[in-house]
Image: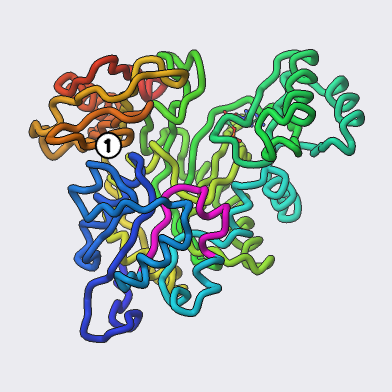
Amino acid sequence: MRVPDIRKSLKSNSRVAMRILLLGSGGREHALAWKLNQSVWANPLYIAPGNPGTAQYGINVPLDITDFKAISDFCIKEDIEMVVVGPEEPLVNGLYDYFKADKKLKKIYFIGPSRKGAMLEGSKAFAKAFMQRHNIPTAAYKEFTVDNYEEGVTYLKNHALPIVLKADGLAAGKGVAICQNHVEAIAEFELMIQQAKFGEASKKVVVEEFLDGTELSVFVITDGKHYLILPEAKDYKRIGEGDTGLNTGGMGAVSPVPLATPGFMHKVEERIIKPTIQGIEKEKIEYVGFVFFGLISVKGEPYVIEYNCRMGDPETEVVLPRLESDLVGILIAATQKELSETVVRVDKRNAATVMAVSRGYPLGYEKGFTISGLDKKFGKQSLVFQAGTKEEGDKIITCGGRVLCVTSYGSTISDAVSTSLDVLDHIEFEGMYYRTDIGYEFK
Ligand code: AMP
C-alpha cells in the first residue's frame, strides 16, 4: 500500500500519531479497536462507550453516542483528530452534519457519511429510488403510505408470492417481513402503516419482489469518488442450525465467500459498486466512510438487497482480521481523497466467526452471568471479540443477547470454524448457545 504522508494531513508537522475516537460498543467495535490499535498512528485510541474487550486496545469513555453535544465536547477537550463511527444510528441522525456545522469540529477527520448519505440505510425508499436513478440491479418495488393505502392493498392482492414488505426507516433489523400468502401480507401491511408497528419507521412501506438466491455482503471504503473493496463476507442470521428459526443480529460469518469468484466480483464492481459511488458523487452526497452492500446472487447475477452506511456485525469480525493493510492509513487516505492511490492487502486465509449468545435470544434472555475462560491463551489463530459484556468488579459478565464471538483463521472455512468451536469449548457462561454449523454450505 502507498502510505499517505500522514504529516501532510495533520495539524502539527511534528506529530506522527493521531488522536482517534471510535464510537460504539459491540463486537464490530471490538474488532475495529483491535485493528485501529495495530496502527502506529493510533495514539491514543478512545472508544465510546466501548466494552471490556475494547478496553484492551484503547481507553473506554462513558459517552452516550446519541448525545452529540457530549461527543463534541469530548472531541474538543481531548483534541480528537479522527472520529470513526461504528453503528448507523448517529449517522442516520446527522452526526457528520453536526460536526461539519461547527467550526471547532469541522477539521476533524470524520469516518461516516453525511445524513443524506446515511439515508441509503436509513430510508429503504430513498435507497430504492437511488438504485433506480443509477440503474443498479435490485428487486422491483413500490412504496406506500397511509395516503395510497387502498392502492397498496390492491397491489398486494395481485402480487406474486412470496411478498417482501419493508418498513422504510430503521427498525433495529426487524422491519422486513417475507410473507408467504396474501392474507399475511395484507395483515402485515396494515400493522405497519395503520398500527405503526415500527412507529415512524413504518409510516412508509416498501413492497418488493422476492429474490431467490444466495446472500453475501460486500464492503467498500469510499472517499465519495474513489473506493477500495474490502474482503467480502457471508453472515448467518437465523438462530438455529441449518438456517432455521428466528432472525438475529447475526450468529456468525465467514470470509472469503466461495461464490464471490473473480467473475462474480467483476459484475458486482461494474454493475453495483461503480454506479453507487458515481451516484454518490453525482448527487453531491458527502460520503467518507464504509458502504456495506447486502447482495443476493440470483443464478450468478448480483442484486442489491440493501445498503448499510457502516460495517456489519459480525461481518467486521471476519473482514478486518483479513485486512493486512494499516486501517488508519486507509482512513486517512479516504479523508484526503487519496483512495485511488491506495491498495488493500488481504490475508489469503479463511476467517470464520462464531457468535455465542444468551439463552432465549433473540427473544427474552437474562443478563449478568459471569463469563469464564476469557483470560486463557488461545493461540495466534483465534481472536475473541466481546459484544454484550460488562465489567463487574474483577469479573466480566453478560449484558446482551449477543455476548461474544470467536474468530479463527484456517486454510479452509471448516478449519476456521472448528478452531473457533474448540476455543468456545473453553469459554463459559450460564445459558451460552452458539451455532456449530457456520459456513455449513461451504464444507
Ligand atoms: P434487509 O433488512 O433489507 O437486509 O432485509 C433483511 C433480510 O430479508 C435480508 O437479509 C434478506 O434475507 C431478506 N430479504 C430482503 N429483501 C429481500 C428480497 N427482495 N428478496 C428476498 N429476500 C429478501
Q: Which residue of the protein is positioned furthest toward the bottom in this rendering? A: 13
The N terminus - image quarter: bottom left
In the image shown, does 411 or 436 lie closer to the viewer? Answer: 436
Q: Position of residue 379 (x, y in %)?
A: 10, 36
The amino acid pointed to by label 1 is: Gln
Q: Please tell me whether residue 90 belongs to the stretch shown in magenta.
A: yes
Q: Please tell me whether residue 216 belongs to the stretch shown in magenta.
A: no
Ligand 1 resides in the quarter of the picture at top right
Q: Position of residue 38 (x, y in %)?
A: 21, 57
The colour scheme applied to this rendered structure is rainbow
Q: Which residue is mark 1?
A: 386
In the image, is 19 to the left or to the right of 217?
left
- Where residue 7 sits, quadrant-wise, is bottom left
Residue drawn at x 91%, y 28% is 150
Q: Position of residue 127 (x, y in %)?
A: 67, 48
In the image, is 148 to the left or to the right of 232?
right
Q: Is residue 328 visible?
A: yes
Q: Which residue of the protein is positioned furthest toward the left in this rendering? A: 377
In the image shown, does 259 or 276 lie closer to the viewer? Answer: 276
The C terminus - image quarter: top left
Q: What kind of element bears circle 1?
A: strand
In the image, is 329 to the left or to the right of 164?
left
- Where residue 328 sits, quadrant-wise, is bottom left
- Where residue 162 sits, quadrant-wise, is top right
Residue 247 lies, with reference to residue 337, above or below; the image says above
Q: Which residues are magenta?
A: 82-96
Residue drawn at x 39%, y 59% is 84
In the image, is 137 to the left or to the right of 309?
right
Residue 66 lies, with reference to residue 398, above or below; the image says below
